[in-house]
Amino acid sequence: MVDFSSILALLVEGVLLAALGVLTGILFMGIARKVVARVHNRVGPPVYQSYIDIIKLLTKKTNISHGWIFDLALLFSISGILLTLLFLPIGGIKLLSIHGDLFLVLYLLAIPALGFALGAGASGNPNAGIGVMRALVMMFSYELPFIIAVLAVMIYYDTTSIATIVASQSHMRWAILVPPLLIGALVADMALQGMLMEKPFDIPIAPHEIASGPMVEFGGKYLGTLMLYKATSIVVETTLFVDLFLGGAVVLDPATYGAVAYAVNLVVWFLLILAVFIISVLINTVFPRFRIEQALKFYWSYDTALAILALMWIYFLYI
Amino acid sequence: MIWEAISLMVLLALLAYATGRLSRYSGIFAVLAGFVPLAMLFDWAPTAGLKHLISLGFEKSTAVNIKIATLHFSITPLSWLFLTMVGGIFPFIALYAISYFKKAPGGFFGSMTLALVGATGVVLASDLLTFFIFWEVMSWSAFLLVVRGRDRSAITSYFSFSALSAYLILFGIMVLRSEAETLSFSSLSSSITSSRLTLLAFISMAAGFGVKGALMPLHIWAPRAYSRSEEPFVAYLAGGLSKLGYYGIFLLFYSFVGVSVITRFGTFRGVPYLGYSLAIFGALSAFIGTVLAFMEDDLRKLLAYSSIGQLGYIAIGIGIGTPLALSGALFQAVNHTFFKAVLFLAAGSVYYRTGRWKISELGGVAYRMPFTFLAALFSIFALAAIPITSGFAAKWLLYVSTVDKRFVFLTPIMLIAGVGAFLYSFRILYGVFLGEPRYPDIKEAPALQLIPMWILVMPLVIFLIFPGKLMDVFGEIFAYYGLEGVSHTDFAITTSLSSYNTLAVIFALMGGLMVAFIIYVSRPHRVVSHYDNYLSGEIPEVHEGLSLHAATRYYKPVEDLFQPYFAHGAERFYHHIEVGLEGVGDGLRRLFKTTVSNMIYLVLAGLLLIGWWLTW
Amino acid sequence: MAEEIKEKWSKIARWASKRSLWMVHFCTGCGAIEMPPVMTSRFDMERFGMGSMATPRQADILLITGYLSIKTLKRVVRVYEQMQAPKYVVAFGSCTINGGMYWDSYNTIKDLSKYIPVDLYIAGCMPRPEAIIDAFNKLMEMIDRGEARGWEKYEKYYEKYKRNQEAAFNYKLEEVEEVEEERKGGEK
Ligand code: SF4
């Protein structure tokens, strides 16, 4: 059995990294708003605006709920996304990622989404039902190319564990430097656009069509928690991308450089996920919104074709 | 002892038949009969936890001489596992059925018990003759139950497909017997050669078993029979009896024909072609079943298609045949037994209270039936493989096994089918249980329905925490068939590619829930009505007959895209066959006056004749 | 000590709520057309952390952008009641103050504050974007000083407001009375 001190260390590490993840995510939401504002040639809100928003939502004087199933949204969304965060290596810090793998992470990501969907459904608002339908169809759309691209990575490194994938990319042998995996990264980045629900794939929330879809009845602490969930999911999804294709942001080997390496890696991790996120925000700024069947068609045709190309390239020429 | 136990069950079945018209409490006999396999299970338990809990002294193997033949029974770890599936859920389903029927259900409980007898016999059989006899007992009693649904297309499709399955299996048995000169499981595989005839026998038996396992494209009967029969039976059919098809396929691979013979027909990356093609059929079932499921509006049909999809995963696992994949398949079989039984029972309870099957006509049931909802929610989590139930471990083993073998076609298909499972899961959750409270006056399901449901949910939770316990049983099975095991502890499964530790998931989830709970209690909230909703300022109460339930054709955008490709493809194929056969059938009709009972007598007589010929 | 912490906390809460005002997208009269310039590049109200939200559950400010017919009033009241406290109402244009050019119409209300509590009026027909931005700044100051308490007033005089609303819904505008003797809250 594991000794007590290592469990304690893991606990402290987990709490710290979870906090880091959440805080980074909220900052990212602010940065996104600033970036969009600058593209629109506006001043935009301060980058810390999202912190203020969350404090405001969590200090609202009244909150309404539609019964206990509605509350599940709050409980499952934030806990599920924190759980997922802990199963990802962040800047080379493994955390729980050795106890799970990529498939686990893909399914863990469904916990908060399904919890959220349950709450939305329990609100009894038809807009929420439609929004969840769109979210699920979106998921059905982008998962196919994403899975094929990720499968290319998995069979290239012959593992399904994210920690091992990160380890195999050490010494800057990043996956995107392998030509087929570069295509894979491109595919995954397009899928990421859908995962992050940025335009042109913000179909599920579509504020102007279905009154922000699943969130229509959420306010106060419920909406605050959902913002925390959204913020953390930005970090989770971009980190997943960085772990798979950008070497998990490991530039210095902790074995030789010690604590400095961790600090440097965390900084690099921050910069890389920021870069990935900003690319997606920039795409978001200039696009209008697809309809849901257009999104499905897009993902299952162009994106999947590219993904299959990457997979076949790996399959026949690299292994 | 085994034969006495089976006779006791038959006796109880007869009692249930005899009293069936008097009262619905004749189901007691069925429940009692259900405890017989339970007793066997405890007595034979291969893992330390259950061993010697009670000792009834069931012998490990036995031969019984009845007039026309000698029946051989024995217990192996595999049959123990499948006995938990077909026997373990039966008493609870029977208990449920007592409360489900509002008046005396006639022959229902008798036929159910007979089906149990058949299923028990099938898993305990140790030669092909015994196997086939009980297989037919099981099939025909299930047929009697399908007939009770009084739906012509369900009856004819079930009848023709199970007859087809019986002939295919029988043909295979005859070929095997002529090749190996024996019918006993233990000596079959050693004396079989890899001739063309063996291949033919293999394929025909696999197809025969595939019918019972609702494997595409042999699934046509399933949605019809599932959606037109009484719910407790459907729960048993989907949860228990469908596994027997995969039990047969498993035996076909490891006992009837044997891996060494099968590999001689060629391999692909170390997996026999035959296995790989089974896996492909499984993957197609998984994907097409899933897509058809989320386009379906009838709750029972949806669940039927979902069964087809989920059973497809078992076929994939058995087809690939590595220890990893087999564990995945068996794990999936165990999970599916429980969650699908619970789902059908929960659907039955919803029908019991509302009288509706169409998802678009239901809605808001959860607010009135919270315990039914929770049971259904748990099993839906298991079905969608959310890692807070045991459902995930099974899918995970299968995924890893395909990546391990680098089957780049299977992995994406399985995973996308897994995502599709979220889609139809949510269609059930939203359409039936959540959304607008359309049934404000219904009551919670009766306790006699809730208790069985919740007992059946328990294994899903137990095997979440201790997947290793189940893996121990699989280990015994692998040892029995001379395969390697999968390395595991009580909480963790380790493969060459990665590992999965349930404790890590559970503790991390606890931590997360703690954070969420702090936020939840830190601010007060007030519960408002479901009609106090933002509808662009509109006030729903003032509009007569306004529906706030967006559940009609829920996935319309996807439906519109997929309809041309998926609509009744297989059914059209069978329709052509049907038209062709009609001419032949017309001729035959003059020979036999086709009433159902006539047909049964004819087929039974034929079977008896064949059985006599085989053992002679 | 506990008091101090409570005071500090409510100060933080007030600060956060003033710096992050979300409005519900509910446009009634002509005034709505002045909102796009306020939101977009020229005046950019997102500078102040303001944004528009799709539903009242998420929003803090209800903008009444102009005249209100009685039919719309029903919806406005429902939307207002669905908002989560603390919530503020900002009324645009002379129509909401005294009926404006619809002063003698049979189916528009004349004085909004008799039906829901108004925290701030913006005069003009139509107020220009500069005026709107200025009003929002004023509202923020009021929130900071703890003066924007319309929602508390609504709870306190709930009966009276309801009576007035009922009278209006039944087109008996002459039965509508003052909710309070003297009207509080800033006017511009
Ligand atoms: S005040 Fe003038 S601009 Fe505003 S609603 Fe009335 S008439 Fe229209």
Image (cartoon, rainbow, N blue to C red):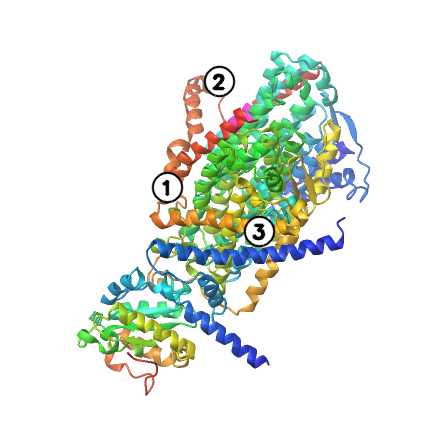
Q: Nearer the viewer, mark 3 or mark 2?
A: 3
Marks 2,1: beta carbons within 8 A: no
Q: In which quadrant of the rendered view does residue B203 lie?
A: top right
- Residue farthest to the bottom, as pictured: C181
Amino acid under label 2? Leu
Q: Main secondary structure of the magenta part?
A: helix
Residue under circle 3?
A266
Q: Is B309 included in the stretch rendered in magenta?
A: no
Report which residue position mark 1 lands on. Answer: A293
Residue B33, image x, y percentages: 69, 41
Q: What numbered label is drawn on residue A195?
A: none
Kind of residue sitting beneath label 3: Leu
Left or right of B434 in this view: C31: left
The chain holding disc 3 is A
Quadrant containing ligand 1:
bottom left
Quadrant containing the N terminus of chain C is bottom right
Q: Please name which of the two marks, 3 or 1, marks the residue nearer to the observer.
A: 3
- Kindly report the distance in space between the C-alpha atoms of the residues bearing marks 3 and 2: 83 Å
Q: Assign the C terminus of chain C to one quadrant of the image.
A: bottom left
Q: Is mark 3 within 8 Å of ligand 1?
A: no
Residue B591, labelled with which disc? 2
Closer to the camera in the image, C44 or C117: C44
Of B355 and B103, nearer the camera is B355
The stretch of residues the image draws in magenta is B159-165
Image point 35% across, 53% down: which residue? Answer: A39
| B512 to B38, vertically: above or below | below
In the rendered image, the vertical position of residue B233 relative to residue C174, given as above or below: above
